[in-house]
Image (tube, rainbow, N blue to C red):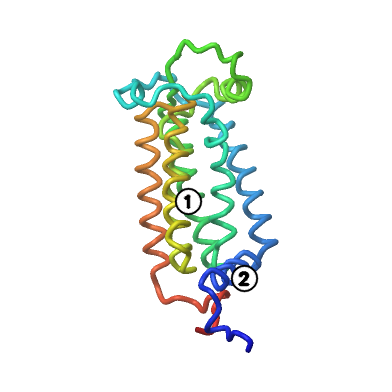
Amino acid sequence: MRLSQEAAPAGAAFVSRLGARVGHLFLLKTLSTAGGIALFFYAYFWAMRHPLSEVSVMPMIWIDQWIGFQPLSFPLYASLWLYISLATALARDFRDLAAFGVASLAMSIVGLAIFMLAPTKVPDFGIDWSLHPSLQFMKSVDVSGNACPSLHAAFCVFAAVVLHTQLRNLRAPQWLIAGNVLWSLGILGSTMATRQHVALDAIAGAALGGVVSIAYVVAMSGPDARSVETVQT
């Protein structure tokens, strides 16, 4: 006797919903994500090269000493761009994707404006970066600043909230929802563990991401459009 769709395992149903969600507007999601990241980096480096005042050094606090330098955390730091891409891949529809883009643009404008008006950089940690080639390259291109607020932290917090909302909407298993929280915390910690930012940078960035996340949730809390992953239950 064939199992009916109603009797299908919850895991299989979730995979079906996930596949439908990712496949919807796939090309638009891919192009908009790649284009958005490219434009962000162009604006980021332009702002770094055109500060409107003297660059100041960010102070360290006890959290920086507690976390310490962890060069092996670089892959986790770099995984932010995959993390963001997952959030756009799971956008439910064009409205959801557009809201993500508008929120990201607003967050970038605020952060880049601060970088230009009140530029900052991390202190000299006395680390021989030649011993850590990946980090050395990152330090060579980020030499003049763009420290506070950490937009790495801001985008991490925003993407975490978006992914949490999407996973709940998709009725994802609890271990996947918990994994999203752990991944975001790992990325936040890596901003300090790589010495790319100090704790105050990360805190300021997380606050910026939190404010934008609230605006996003409020904007998306209106009447739901019919979801592309709707299945019979």
Q: Secondary structure at mark 1?
A: helix
Task: Give the residue pinned by disc 1.
Answer: 159
Q: CA distance from mark 1 to mark 2?
A: 20 Å
Residue 122 location (% of width, % of height) = 44, 21
Residue 92, compared with residue 59, is above or below; it is below
Q: Is residue 40 above or below residue 18?
A: above
Point out the frontmost of discs 1 and 2. Answer: 2
Q: Tag 1: residue type?
A: Ala
Number of numbered discs overlaid on the protein picture: 2
Task: Answer few, some or many: residues within 10 Å of disc 2's Cα (few below 14, many 20 plus, some between 14 and 19).
Answer: some
Q: Kindly identify which residue carries mark 2.
A: 20
Percent position of residue 8, x then y: 55, 78
Q: Classify 160 as above or below 97.
A: above
User: In the image shown, does 134 or 176 lie closer to the viewer?
Assistant: 176
Disc nearer the start of the sequence (1/2): 2
Q: Is residue 231 above or below residue 47?
A: below
Residue that extends furthest to the front in the rendered view of this protein: 1
Name the image quarter holding residue 44. Answer: top right
Q: Kindly give the residue lying farthest to the bottom in the view shown.
A: 1
Residue under the point 68% across and 55% down: 31
Q: Position of residue 7 (x, y in %)?
A: 53, 82
Give the residue type that dot 2 points to. Answer: Ala
